[in-house]
Amino acid sequence: MEEQLERRTLDTQTADLLRNQIISGKLGAGERLTEVQIADQFQLSRGTIRSALQELKKEGLVDQLPYRGWAVSELTIRDAFELQSLRSALEALAAKLVAQTIDDTKKKRLNAAFSQLCLKAKSSNAREAAVADYDLHFCTVQLSGHKHLFDMYKLMGGQVQRYIYEANMLVENGDELIAQHAPIIDAIASGDAKKSEQLAYEHNEKEGHKLVDCLEGALIKRATKR
Amino acid sequence: MEEQLERRTLDTQTADLLRNQIISGKLGAGERLTEVQIADQFQLSRGTIRSALQELKKEGLVDQLPYRGWAVSELTIRDAFELQSLRSALEALAAKLVAQTIDDTKKKRLNAAFSQLCLKAKSSNAREAAVADYDLHFCTVQLSGHKHLFDMYKLMGGQVQRYIYEANMLVENGDELIAQHAPIIDAIASGDAKKSEQLAYEHNEKEGHKLVDCLEGALIKRATKR
Amino acid sequence: MEEQLERRTLDTQTADLLRNQIISGKLGAGERLTEVQIADQFQLSRGTIRSALQELKKEGLVDQLPYRGWAVSELTIRDAFELQSLRSALEALAAKLVAQTIDDTKKKRLNAAFSQLCLKAKSSNAREAAVADYDLHFCTVQLSGHKHLFDMYKLMGGQVQRYIYEANMLVENGDELIAQHAPIIDAIASGDAKKSEQLAYEHNEKEGHKLVDCLEGALIKRATKR
Amino acid sequence: MEEQLERRTLDTQTADLLRNQIISGKLGAGERLTEVQIADQFQLSRGTIRSALQELKKEGLVDQLPYRGWAVSELTIRDAFELQSLRSALEALAAKLVAQTIDDTKKKRLNAAFSQLCLKAKSSNAREAAVADYDLHFCTVQLSGHKHLFDMYKLMGGQVQRYIYEANMLVENGDELIAQHAPIIDAIASGDAKKSEQLAYEHNEKEGHKLVDCLEGALIKRATKR
DNA sequence: GTGGTCTAGACCACC
DNA sequence: GTGGTCTAGACCACT
């Protein structure tokens, strides 16, 4: 196995590290972050930390409180709804594009992602299934070959994953999860662009309501726990 | 007294300035930018300039050439197509959302933007008409109240406007321009979400092909001129 | 590209804004200003406002009422006389210096300012003529290249302009205004330092008496109106 | 002897202290000042120090280097010339005004200042003579009763005194110093405004050239010493 | 030589 | 005292 050189800049690495902590909930919503404290912790200068935080701000994972510091952003139902509706629009577009340009290579990668989803769906770990779900959609976006679409999708990635973690009962039934995605994958693989787009869009619409309901429960539970 | 104080930072101001020059073509595609030269010109430090250029890079207006500098990004047919397809998806979503939440205030703002489009469409200035076209769509995105959607739309704004400037023959027929938008505005104003979404989507699909054709001509012409 | 970036601090901007309102009479003599109210209005903190008010205090435009706040300073005949006599001394010096260093560039700028004065003098707007008068003298001070002189002149500027606004009947006869200034401009343009100084001094001496008379009327009128 | 209560604010006291150190050369031209260092030294907060430095900046004794700190301003020939020419203009005005309003009280104060000058002129200490010279002129400005003139004169005071210290061979001949001032004092005391103004002006003009010559030597010497 | 990256530290504005 | 903004300059890698 080849050694991989670390060429990521310190601010990127810092952003990645913090992002993971936020996504995984180690840094909880509302938690305050101070530039100096992080700088001390990682032995970096304030400028580097600021750069990392700006990146996370762009991704919607932290809020900048003017003259008072930074805080991990709150998870609101509104955001969940907005993100889900955006996903619907973007993933439908991706599905259409992949169907239009489907070839063996793409079929292979798509099937691999779908297989992974099937695997996780049958396991008992709902969270992993949700991640596989996300990965599958991420895969279609990648395969669409649409650079601008891909960039935007990545920009939303952190927040989306965070919701998935937070609301990990998203999928109560693995078989249903598979049943939902199978026709989309089929439509794409068969090159039926219109149908792919339609199915992807409807899937997300449906999921959106479920997600919102689910989060509503999760957030209320979280709130009452405090 | 509603005077406004200038609170923009120097990097933001620099980015705005450069963005305008790129959009308007004063800085042409492929033109090289050096950090030091800009820093000297504006009497700012390199860091400030870098920050501005990073912003423009995010917006796709400049490319970073590793170890060699920066250049105004090229206008490719591929980008035009990508941007147009993204607009289709995002604006359709916006149209649906506005229709779902339409009220008198929103109707008023929408009509104002549409009137402006009609005015410009009837004038002989195709570029201004195209700008009014963009402004109308921008308006629907704003009125959708969808923050994440709005942010994404803004991120694309610079590139979109650039294409509009470059291909200012987009509209050969003002009346047609009005005829195309009128039904969408009507659908939104009447609160018909499904129809709004559908019409907005179809409108953009159609325009997409025209834009690409148009740009193909413009870019080829530009290339041969060199 | 000669775009200018905004580098003014917020307190400077606030001071500029308030200065204009005082000069133009929107904030009248004696009017009370409270730090908190201004801070709220501009969405700034009190410290920033204090800094701006201190600046205006130095310029004599506001008075600090210990433990009670701030107020727009009153216009007194005594101040008018003092300012006019100071102007005499400073502008005579400026005229001399410009004459000593006159060149084509300076002649051009001087003539431009003088032309503006002629234009306004012939119009019916006495206030604009007075402003053009002030601008012409300001111009000579600038052209003198005497930094300390310039700073002092600016320090008086707000108060002087305020008098000009208040007493806008300063010039009852446009032609006379032109006739008064023409020989000074000629002397400067011809490089006759001694004559320039002499004429400038005498001009201001004469104007001083007229200004005081004029203000006497204006202030009395203002007082009786209350 | 009665105890004198210190009612001056801390920033004023700090400004006075620093001003003296600059005038007397203990803080040399070009020397860097940092807010934090001064704050530590005097056990004051940075805000207080900033306020004092702003005051000295207004007086031209320190320069603010944006984002880099403060520095004692440099002594240039240009500044010396500018200050001297300004003094000429302002002191001539003062002399005229005092002559116009001369009375026994003023005569007394004027004579006291002049006697002091005579005393010091005959001593061997050129610097003290120069200070007495300055004090005499300061006295006329005070006696003029012209508040704005007085404020401006004070604003220049620090820089003027600094030059006097730097070039303390200004007066090589005490008798001549007395001979120069006597006719001015006489003219003022006799109430001859025109003559007072004229003599004061000419005196300063003459002194100006000498000062510049003198400083040229002093500054060159200072430079070569380094 | 220029960009890529990071640090140290200054003033600015707010709390 | 903190964050907000900007500067200066170090050192390294690449062209």
Image (cartoon, coloured by chain):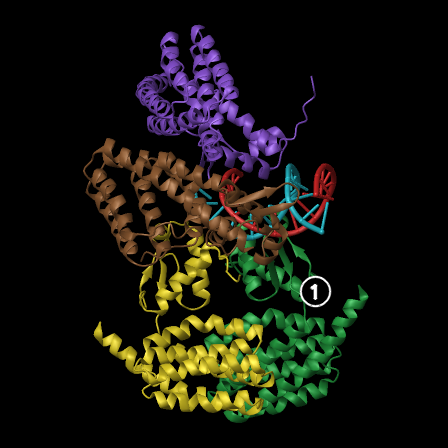
Chain colours: A purple, B brown, C yellow, D green, E cyan, F red
In the depicted structure, whether residue B94 falls above or below residue A126: below
Subunit that carries the residue with mark 1: D
Residue B9 can be seen, yes or no: no
At x 35%, y 66%, the residue is C22
C100 to the left or right of B170: right
Residue C157 horizontal/vertical position (percent): 44, 72
In the depicted structure, whether residue B226 falls above or below residue C88: above
C106 to the left or right of B123: right
Residue A87 horizontal/vertical position (percent): 39, 27
C94 to the left or right of D217: left
A193 to the left or right of B29: left
Residue C74 horizontal/vertical position (percent): 34, 71
**Tag 1, which secondary structure?**
loop
| Image quadrant assignment for residue C105 | bottom right
Counting labels gives 1
Residue D4 can be seen, yes or no: yes
In the depicted structure, whether residue B131 falls above or below residue A198: below
Q: Residue furthest right?
A: D225
Observer-nearest residue: A188 or A120?
A: A188
Q: In which quarter of the image is the N terminus of chain A?
A: top right
The residue beneath circle 1 is: D25
Residue C176 horizontal/vertical position (percent): 37, 91
Observer-nearest residue: D203 or A111?
A: A111
At x 43%, y 17%, the residue is A133
Residue type beneath disc 1 = Gly
At x 32%, y 35%, the residue is B201
| Image quadrant assignment for residue C168 | bottom left
Q: Quadrant of the C terminus of chain A?
A: top left
Mark 1, other Cα within 10 Å: few <14 / some 14–19 / many ≥20: few
